[in-house]
Amino acid sequence: MKINTAELKRALEIVKPGLSNKELVEQSTAFAFVNGCVVTYNDEISVSHPVAGIEIEGAVQAEELYKFISKLKTEEITLTIEEEAIVIKSGRSTAGFALAKEIKLPLKEELTKKGKWVPITQEFVETLKFVSLSCSKDLSNPKLTCVHVNKNGFIESSDNYRICHYKIDVPVKTFLLPESSVDPIARLKPTSISEGKGWVHFKTDEGTIISSRTFFEDFVDTSKYIKFGQEGITINLPKNLDEILDKAIVFIKKEKNFTDDIEVSITEKFLVVESKSETSWFKEEAPIHYTDEPISFALSPFLLKDIIAKTDKCTLVKNILYFNEANWIYITTVKNVK
């Protein structure tokens, strides 16, 4: 069979987020070829993408196949199956890859049951990303590491110190989506959603399906804190804050499970942004008009960039800082600075 090289390479790139670094689940480090699609599964997410013309059924270890396909220059490749291997010919190059004809990933058992596909807007997808930046990194309390998608018309998150709440139409039942699944989902820009059993599924216009495990615990009750139009001390943020944040991001920790927060302090004359990694640090101040007690708070610089793209001010009420517009609110506790 002849396959377009660029299309196959792109398909492998799309499904890579569903691979495991280690084979904790059998074949979770492999590309599975099923019903004209390439599929990955790592027990947390699964990604499937159609490949035109492919007629393979089985699993191939991902790393060498992906690296080889990435190096090819020919427009087309020829795939044949010889005994228990896939043989790929590109120009004068030939490579063989062991093919496990039995797919042992639990795709039928866990991912077959899907409800009706329901359209979602790009705003829904962007809201998942926006809200996910306030999730906790503390795995001892799993529900706080999730985005709470509520059928009553909002998406929210909290780490017990901060809350992000966004009013938006939710066309499915309530579920908790792990924060770790949000970025791979958002990158694909899905246009529809479907409920599964213990999973939620998203689909793109190209036919890519990305599925994520969900939690069905009760989320923390944030309703008593969600108050729009708070009266307090209005703080107008510096106009160059976005540029400062771009520099601060260079210095945040990149390691998994480490917070990527920066520290923001507001004093009588300045707003100060500080960030640091294991080996370096950053600090910059910008003039600001503020006459109350000095305060500080921590948050993701990516979230703050999203916030200031929507509003250039916040409101301080006692030890709580509010950023909000008509359909969303971000709340964080602040500390007094001596």
Image (cartoon, helix red, strand yellow):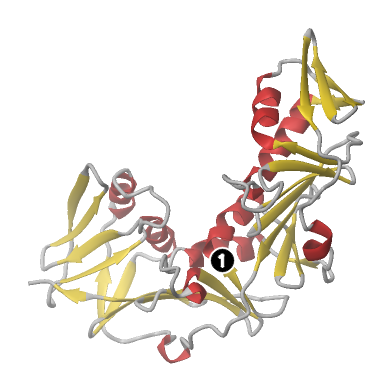
- Tell me, yes or no, if residue 170 can be seen here: yes
Residue 202 place in picture, x, y as percent? 72, 60
Q: Which residue lies furthest to the bottom in this view?
A: 224
Residue 314 place in picture, x, y as percent? 32, 72
Near mark 1 (Cα within 10 A), the count class, few <14, some 14-19 or many ≥20, is many
Q: Which of 90 and 109 is in front in this view?
A: 109
Q: Which amino acid does label 1 sit on?
A: Pro
- Tell me, yes or no, if residue 165 can be seen here: no
Q: Nearer the viewer, residue 105 or 213?
A: 105
Residue at the spot of label 1: 178
Q: In which quarter of the image is the N terminus?
A: top right
Q: Which residue lies furthest to the top in this view?
A: 92
Q: In which quarter of the image is the C terminus?
A: bottom left
Which residue sits at x=63%, y=56%?
185
Which residue sits at x=12%, y=71%?
337
Which residue sits at x=66%, y=28%?
64
Q: In this view, does 38 lie above or below 170?
A: above
Which quadrant holds residue 280? top left
Instruction: Tell me the SS state at disc 1.
Output: strand
Residue 221 place in picture, x, y as percent? 48, 88
Q: Nearer the viewer, residue 161 or 258?
A: 258
Q: How many labels does the image show?
A: 1
Q: In this view, does 146 lie above or below 272?
A: below
Q: Which of 60 and 268 is in front in this view?
A: 60
Residue 236 place in picture, x, y as percent? 27, 67
